Amino acid sequence: MAKRKTKRSAWASITEVERGAVYRIRYWASGPDGYKRRSKTVRGSRKDAERARSELMLAHSDDVPCPTVGEVWRTYALPTWERMVGDGDLAAQTLAVRRSAWNRHVAPTWDAVQCDGVRPLAVQQWLDTLNYSQAKISMFVLRAVMDYAVRYEYVEHSPMRERYVMPSKSTIDRRDAGVWTLDELGEVWRAVRGEWFEAAYLLAAFGGLRVGESLGVTAEDVTAAVVDGQTLAMVRVERQVMNVGGRVSDALKNEQSRRTVAIPGRAGARLLALASAADGFLTGDGFGGPTKQRILKESWHRAQGAMDARLVHPFQNLRNSWQTNMRWSLRLPPWLIEPMMGHRVEGVTGMHYDRPDAEMFAEAVARAYAERPYDAGWEWAD
């Protein structure tokens, strides 16, 4: 079979079907069945094919133009990602991030631009207006949209496949990455003791739960375990409160996130007491429902306004602090900390063999706490 050669133009492509004898022209045009991709076969020379293309271009010069970037987003990209969320193949939070990038950074520039009008120079100029984080997710979204435009033959080539100069990483809005020592966590706990979000604080600071996970814990998820005379709070992580919309979801960040966390000492005892007095969510909205992450963070910010500056960090940093303190203060090994955080242990062992259970977590944490009881001077917490 003769090798097919394709010669492209901005309006239509010519593909050599039989060497020097048969050519196929592909183009977009209106007809009784609407505006769609069409083709015409020309027998003769390359010049005959180019002449036929010119005639088609003249005949269809007033046809419906190529769809806009926004139309392809709404027709293909967004519905596909929404369907993936429904099927469990894409996290709702991931879609929320992509939708936000579209609304805030992509749509204002590209929504009304025809797909065949997206030019590399304009893309680079647009990137120059964004910081690194914004450019990274926005490029992903626009690239995906333009890939659909190529797949459905609205355009022959995606300009998003060119190499671009990304904004410097120094443009990232760097957030507070500070962590608390165990003593400092005790100071913060004393300041927020009795607050409506105290349980969420204890779960994040002494259990390493993510913000949404800390809001998704119910009274039934907290049980007691006794190891060598110690009573620990065993917290099942089964659900989270989503950052966008505030709905409760059984779909956690990954399959390893469904876990049980062991919390020893006075923090564990306090959680058991709060759970025994609660009905439903430990950090609820007062009407039997969950609390939104935004409400928690606003209350956290107000509470920190009265604290010493060295104790002021974002709520989500409590998880980082837990990991740091478990490793360097309680001396737990990373291969034990990672599954307690909801991470998979790297390597073949972590992927196929290592399956610690709640009892193993309880024994390891109880042993580490017995050797280094960090809350020995926190009598106020009793």
Image (tube, helix red, strand yellow):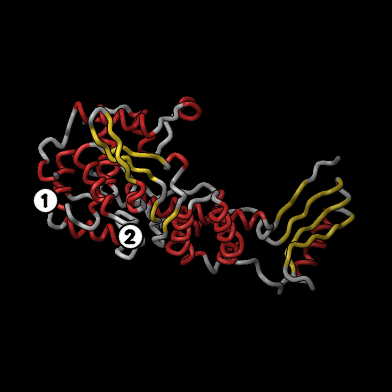
Q: Which numbered marker is on residue 291? A: 2
| Element assignment for label 1 | loop
Name the residue nearer the viewer: 334 or 152: 334
Residue drawn at point x = 41 percent, y = 47 percent: 238
In this rendering, would 47 be left or right of 107? right
- Mark in front: 2 vs 1: 2
Query: Residue 340 is drawn in which quadrant?
Result: top left
- Dot 1 amino acid type: Asp
Q: Which numbered marker is on residue 154? A: none
What is the crowding at mark 2: few (fewer than 14 residues within 10 Å), some, or many (at least 20)?
A: many
Identify the residue position indicated by label 1 in the image.
308
| Residue 345 makes an appearance in the image | yes
Point out the tag, 2 or 1, that comes first from the N-terminus. Answer: 2
Where does residue 65 sit, x and y in percent of width and height? 66, 69
Query: Residue 47 is drawn in which quadrant?
Result: bottom right
Image quarter of the N terminus: top right
Real-space CA distance between mark 2 and mark 1, rounded to the nearest whole angstrom: 27 Å
What is the crowding at mark 1: few (fewer than 14 residues within 10 Å), some, or many (at least 20)?
A: few
Where does residue 281 sit, x and y in percent of width and height? 33, 55
Residue drawn at point x = 52 percent, y = 50 percent: 90
Name the residue nearer the viewer: 13 or 240: 240
